């Protein structure tokens, strides 16, 4: 299962399934402008093994890059039946998958409650195709937390992280403080990869 060099608790422990941690982020320079550059980053962590992925796309949106990061990470898995822990700072992504917005979307013919077409349907359908293949947990992580900043209240950020993800972990499991620090570092690295994806496609000035 996925482990990292510090003490870990339930989010990595599962006796029945191999556990994989995925950290994702998306970015878009000029989001919602007619011309922009998007990037995505993803990290797959399995035991002490880490695989980093990144990519970019022109004229896109931040949400599409968030989704592309997760799709790319899941596409890199070479077997089914895994315990997959997904960590993302995108409420759009985590709320949909945790609260199962897609159930109503499908029932309503991919229309929202306002009877408008669901945005990014093509990517949602690709993402949803992975759900039956694995045992998923989706966790929301605050983005851009500077763990080295003198003004960063890390214990408070830890408390907010626990509150935000209450009810997601199986009973009896818990995130340790060391878990939180590791998750935050990995999420910050995913952000750096997303920006690298932008750099790959943005023309040199």
Image (cartoon, rainbow, N blue to C red):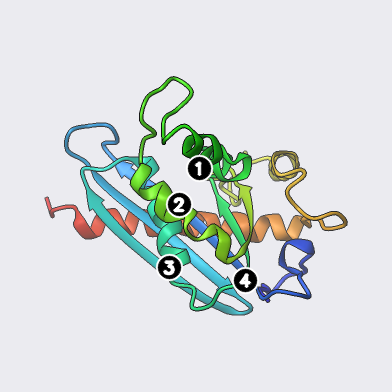
SS at badge 4: loop
Estimate the x, y position of residue 122 in percent, counting from the top left: 34, 47
Q: Closer to us: mark 1 or mark 3?
A: 3
The answer to which image quadrant residue 162 occupies is top right
Closer to the N terminus: mark 1 or mark 3? 3
What residue is shown at x 73% (from left), y 61% (from top)? 11
Closer to the N terminus: mark 3 or mark 2? 2
* Residue indicated by mark 1: 90
What residue is shown at x 36% (from left), y 63% (from top)? 54
SS at badge 2: strand
Q: Tell me whether the residue at label 2 lies in contact with that at label 1, contact meaning CB atoms closer than 8 angstroms.
A: yes
SS at badge 3: helix
Estimate the x, y position of residue 87 in percent, counting from the top left: 58, 54
Question: Residue 82 has which mark?
Answer: 4
Q: Is residue 161 left or right of residue 88?
A: right
Closer to the N terminus: mark 2 or mark 1? 2
* Residue indicated by mark 2: 25
Q: Closer to us: mark 3 or mark 2?
A: 3
Q: Closer to us: mark 4 or mark 2?
A: 4
The extreme top residue here reads 114
Q: Tell me whether the residue at label 4 lies in contact with that at label 1, contact meaning CB atoms closer than 8 angstroms.
A: no
What residue is shown at x 52% (from left), y 69% (from top)? 44
Q: In this view, does 47 lie to the left or right of 53?
A: right
SS at badge 1: loop
């Amino acid at each position: 299962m996925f482990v990292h060099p510090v003490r870990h608790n339930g989010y990595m422990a599962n006796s029945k399934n191999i556990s994989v941690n995925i950290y994702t982020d998306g970015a878009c320079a000029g989001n919602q402008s007619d011309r922009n550059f998007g990037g995505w980053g993803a990290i797959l962590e399995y035991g002490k093994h880490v695989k980093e992925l990144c990519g970019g796309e022109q004229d896109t949106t931040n949400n599409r890059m968030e989704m592309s990061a997760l799709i790319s990470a899941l596409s890199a898995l070479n077997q089914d039946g895994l315990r997959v822990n997904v960590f993302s700072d995108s409420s759009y992504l985590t709320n949909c998958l945790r609260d199962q917005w897609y159930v109503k979307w499908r029932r309503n013919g991919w229309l929202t409650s306002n009877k408008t077409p669901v945005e990014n349907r093509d990517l949602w359908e690709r993402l949803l195709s992975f759900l039956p293949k694995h045992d998923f947990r989706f966790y929301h992580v605050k983005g851009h937390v500077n763990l080295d900043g003198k003004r960063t209240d890390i214990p408070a950020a830890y408390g907010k992280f626990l509150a935000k993800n209450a009810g997601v972990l199986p009973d009896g499991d818990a995130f340790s403080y060391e878990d939180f620090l590791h998750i935050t570092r990995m999420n910050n690295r995913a952000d750096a990869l997303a920006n690298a994806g932008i750099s790959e496609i943005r023309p040199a000035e």
